Amino acid sequence: MTANTAYTASSHEATKNSFSRRALIGGTAALGAVGLLSACGNGSASSEKTKAAGAGANIEDLYNINAQDVNSLKKGGILRLPAGSIGPNFNFYTQSGNTSDNVNVMSTISQAGMWNLDFNGTYKLNTDFAVSFEHSKKGDKVQVAVKLNPKAVFNDGTPITYKALQSTWNIFKSLDNGYNIVSSGIYEFVESVEKGEDDYSATVTFSKPFYPLQSLFSEILHPALEDVELFNNGFVDAPHPEYWAGPFTLADKGWDSTAKTFSIVPNDKWWGTKPLLDKIVFTQMESSAARAAFKNDEIDAIGASTSSTYAEVKNIAGTELRKGTRLYAGGLDINPRRVKDAALRKAIFVGTNREALAKIQFQGLPYEESIPGSMIHMPFSPYYQDNYPTPNNSVSEAQKILEAAGYTKNGEYYEKDGMKAGCAVVVFGDDPTTKGKAQTFTQQMKDVGIKIRIDQHADSEFATILGNWDYDISFSGYSVSADATEGTKQFYYSENNEGIGSAEIDALIDAMTLIEDDKERNLACNEIEKKHMAEFAFLSTITNGPDFVMVKKNLANYGPRLYKSMDWAAVGWMNS
């Protein structure tokens, strides 16, 4: 996962129930946002419904960050933002730290990486860290020549040289090296990282190609993180600002584990463009607390993507609603490590009325969309296909799946080997929309004959519970990148799911990663997803959903931004 991606810091509900993946492009690290239109005026939000962007959408119509020239903005000021969950593991490259809230917070101080992204997902070399990136062929092997910016240093003074690139490769190259990483991604295919003509040059040789090549070094890690214990556990309740680099850094005593506040200030070691703001403060809040804080002028932006929040904050004076749809897919994540019977998972897929759950999610919002059918492509992508298994929303078909697998009805529920067909759905936070979805889902499953228990937890427990796979089902999902290559491998490769999958699908994924043509490769991803969803039923797509953000009207360079990398240094306050 890269720190140089499109973050949506203000979107409390939008970022809350999402895991970010270490796909090194697009909305990889947090829920990005697709801006559709921006309401303005004296605190009132437009009631006109926004339709989710579909095929043929004009990219220029799909973002709104209130873009302003930084030279026209005030120097100084404080930005106050909510977060559903901060920490406890601040190493967002680990399984337990890899949530969108956590990545979003850490993105303010962890910018080291070779790439930035534009609104449409295209790569731009991040010249703060890299001078050039050139690929060629040496025999039958792909090589990449990298030149780093000699000015680049980590906050502890360690220069960012070829050694940092070697360390990044060593950490990510295998799931079997002891590091609690999310996915190996492109690094599994790297054969060597060698010093070039000087310490700021490196030659990367691939054992076999992996595309797109630009996913290489979207993150650059401090060599100290090669210590397995430090990588896995050393960042628990400890952000370690000395190991990162960026325009901001953690303030003195900037992490308050009691008050759950994370405060950053300009970094005097930063060699790039200086930030405008004097400070950014994130405060961990439940949804209800965030709503009250926004109304009381205690925070400057809030996600308004659920009906309860939207209704409370849409008419506050001096604010405006910036509308978008999230770079997100999911809504029903069935953990195969706990719900091990594929037949039970398939029955849940088939028996869930996704339309009913989506209706609850969007009730009271000026937003509508068709039910999405892919975890790896947004509906406006030229590569999008509906890959969801059919039939679905069928109680009778779900019951047939259970009966064919040896379940028999005993009263209201099916049983097999003396055990009821059932599991628990974990729910985070106090938002009534989420509770309503949970209650509806349990009734839907009861109609099928599957017993579902609601397991209620606070927002702050999201990272720990989902990061440790300590759940059966959750209403969560993942961010969506412009390219599906790494997402497809993370979601559907058996090695990333404790062996759950098939050799046939693994072989299809291996072949897909070798396809150089972007269109051909992304369409191959669709065939893999379609097959995996039908056979293994892990991740159910229910919504993409809106990213509605209520913000102070004079907040600039902040809001729904499609795939564009978040530039915290450019965020600031307008003069009027």
Image (cartoon, grey):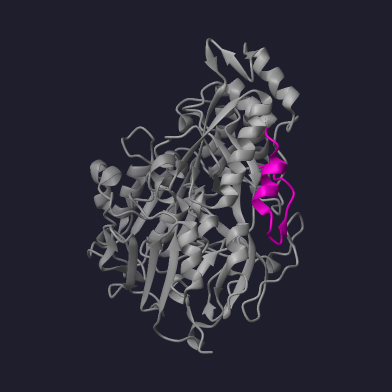
Looking at the image, the residue that sits furthest to the front is 411
Placement of the C terminus among the 4 image quadrants: bottom right
Q: Tell me what residue is drawn at x 38 percent, y 78 percent.
A: 274
Residue at image coords 40%, 50% = 460
Where residue 466 appears, x then y in whole percent?
44, 41
For this view, does 224 lie left or right of residue 25? left
Up/down of 50 relative to 410, above or below: below
| Foreground of the two, 502 or 241 | 241
* In the image, residue 405 above or below residue 101: above
Residue at figure coordinates x 65%, y 18% from the top left: 402
The residue shown at (62%, 64%) is 311
Residue 570 at x, y percent in the picture: 47, 76
- The answer to whether residue 191 is visible is no
Q: Residue 179 magenta-drawn?
A: no
**Left or right: 237 in relation to 291:** left
The image quarter in which residue 113 lies: bottom left
Q: Is residue 75 above or below residue 363?
A: below
Compare residues 96 and 425 and report the one nearer the observer.
425
**Magenta-span inclusion, residue 358:** yes
The magenta segment: 352-374
Count of numbered circles in the view = 0
- Residue 38 is situated, as x and y percent measured from the top left of the image, at 66, 72
* Residue 390 occupies quadrant: top right
Most foreground residue, 119 or 476: 476
Q: Is residue 508 above or below residue 329?
A: above
Q: Is residue 537 visible?
A: yes
Residue 296: x percent and y percent?
47, 73
On the image, which quarter does residue 2 sit in? bottom left
